[in-house]
């Protein structure tokens, strides 16, 4: 018991002396708990809906008003023709598209069956929930669509024809597996890279590097390139499992997917290298990576919870996370089959963040014992 007591005392003394580790242990959990309390929600709220009203009557306006007043859906776009709805769904401006056929008011007055078409972006996390909620809202307000002159007639039926685009079966596996790919890249590259320089400090080999003619940028490149290759191998392995084991469809370009994956790996490595420059031990580097990089990206990037359900300030915070843009790229290439013509904003954001992270890490790095 005496040896155990002294060991506990030693650990407490080391913890007290490491002032950089104390905020990670006590401040970071509080911050993450506060973020989770607001962000970790699966409630349906403000789902963007695009409308194509071919009837343009009081009955069609009443139909739209019936489900838009509750706050679950937000009428973001209007199209003149059903074909124009493709653009809103491809760009991610809308998650659901509703087509109201012409002659709606006439069919309601004569008691005929009315067919409404719903187009759903199946690559979204809450696609199934949004589809069911909107279908129920339309069917629940069917009786309100009857005009006063048609009271004596039989109650018209409203038939909803839902179709989920990009993910027809609404399989959660199809949009979760690409997210797992991104998450694995974040965990592996960030943690391993963050420990690269710190390991040299702990083992004392940084002293040998100091007396060599190696330049700082050469040392940084030498640390990053091997891990970038490892990240590419991880991408290939996960892609193999996703395509042949989970049967996730890959509708886009495989070379484009690999190239943008390498771009994202550079972002994760830049973050990991920056963490290594502010850490003194491998344990501190790992905990900093987990608490301040990996968990915020996993919880706030749209991987687990829809960003549109989060409070507005936290939504603005998610724009600082490279994983947010990479998830859009992955699901766009996997499920939608889109290319750079639609993904260039996300690619530009990743390129900007990657450059900034690497420049910041290189500026902090000094070829000396730190």
Image: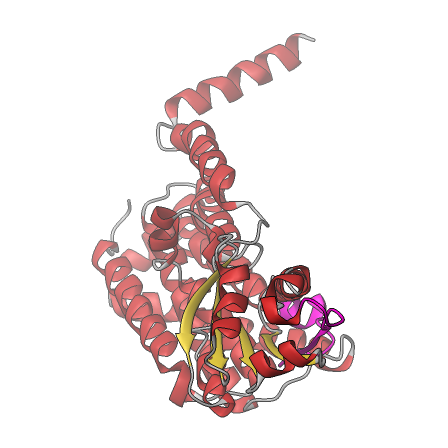
Q: Is residue 147 above or below residue 24?
A: below
Give coordinates of residue 119: x percent, y percent.
60, 78
Q: Is residue 160 above or below residue 102?
A: above
Could you tell me which residue is drawn at 31 percent across and 66 percent down? 353
Viewer-closest of 109 and 78: 109
Q: Residue furthest top?
A: 2
Viewer-closest of 83 and 19: 83
Q: Give the image quarter of residue 125.
A: bottom right
Q: Is residue 358 above or below residue 194?
A: below
Give coordinates of residue 97: x percent, y percent.
53, 76
Magenta segment, which residues? 151-178
Could you tell me which residue is drawn at 52 percent across and 55 percent down? 72
* In the displayed structure image, the side of residue 146 where residue 306 appears, left or right: left
Give coordinates of residue 123: x percent, y percent.
59, 73
Q: Residue furthest left?
A: 363
* In the displayed structure image, the side of residue 138 where residue 241 appears, left or right: right
Figure quadrant of the C terminus: top left
* In the displayed structure image, the side of residue 194 where residue 175 appears, left or right: right
**Residue 313 visible:** yes
């Amino acid at each position: 018991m005496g040896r155990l007591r002294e060991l506990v005392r030693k650990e407490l003394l080391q913890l007290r002396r490491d002032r950089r580790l104390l905020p990670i242990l006590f401040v970071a959990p509080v911050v993450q708990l506060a973020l989770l309390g607001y962000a970790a929600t699966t409630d349906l709220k403000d789902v963007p809906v695009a409308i194509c009203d071919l009837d343009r009557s009081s009955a069609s306006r009443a139909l739209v008003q019936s489900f838009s007043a509750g706050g679950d859906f937000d009428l973001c776009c209007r199209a003149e023709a059903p074909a124009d709805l493709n653009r809103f769904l491809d760009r991610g401006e809308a998650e659901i598209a509703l087509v109201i056929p012409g002659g709606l008011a006439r069919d309601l007055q004569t008691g005929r069956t009315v067919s409404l078409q719903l187009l759903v972006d199946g690559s979204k996390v809450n696609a199934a929930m949004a589809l069911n909620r909107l279908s129920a809202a339309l069917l629940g307000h069917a009786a309100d669509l009857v005009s006063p002159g048609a009271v004596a007639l039989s109650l018209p039926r409203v038939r909803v024809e839902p179709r989920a685009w990009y993910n027809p079966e609404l399989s959660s596996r199809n949009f979760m597996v690409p997210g797992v790919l991104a998450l694995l890249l974040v965990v592996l590259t960030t943690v391993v890279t963050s420990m690269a320089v710190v390991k040299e400090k702990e083992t004392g080999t940084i002293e040998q590097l100091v007396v060599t003619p190696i330049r700082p940028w050469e040392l940084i490149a030498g640390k990053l390139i091997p891990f970038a290759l490892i990240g590419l191998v991880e991408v290939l392995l996960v892609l193999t499992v996703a395509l042949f084991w989970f049967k996730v469809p890959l509708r886009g370009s495989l070379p484009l997917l690999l190239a943008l994956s390498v771009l994202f790996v550079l972002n994760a490595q830049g973050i990991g290298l920056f963490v290594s420059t502010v850490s003194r031990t491998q344990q501190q580097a790992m905990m900093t990576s987990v608490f301040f990089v990996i968990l915020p990206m996993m919880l706030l990037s749209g991987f687990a919870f829809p960003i549109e359900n989060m409070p507005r300030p936290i939504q603005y915070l998610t724009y600082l996370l490279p994983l947010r843009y990479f998830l859009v790229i992955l699901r766009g290439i996997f499920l939608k089959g889109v290319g750079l013509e639609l993904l260039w904003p996300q690619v530009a954001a990743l390129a900007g963040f990657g450059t900034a992270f690497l420049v910041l890490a290189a500026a902090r790095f000094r070829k000396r014992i730190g």
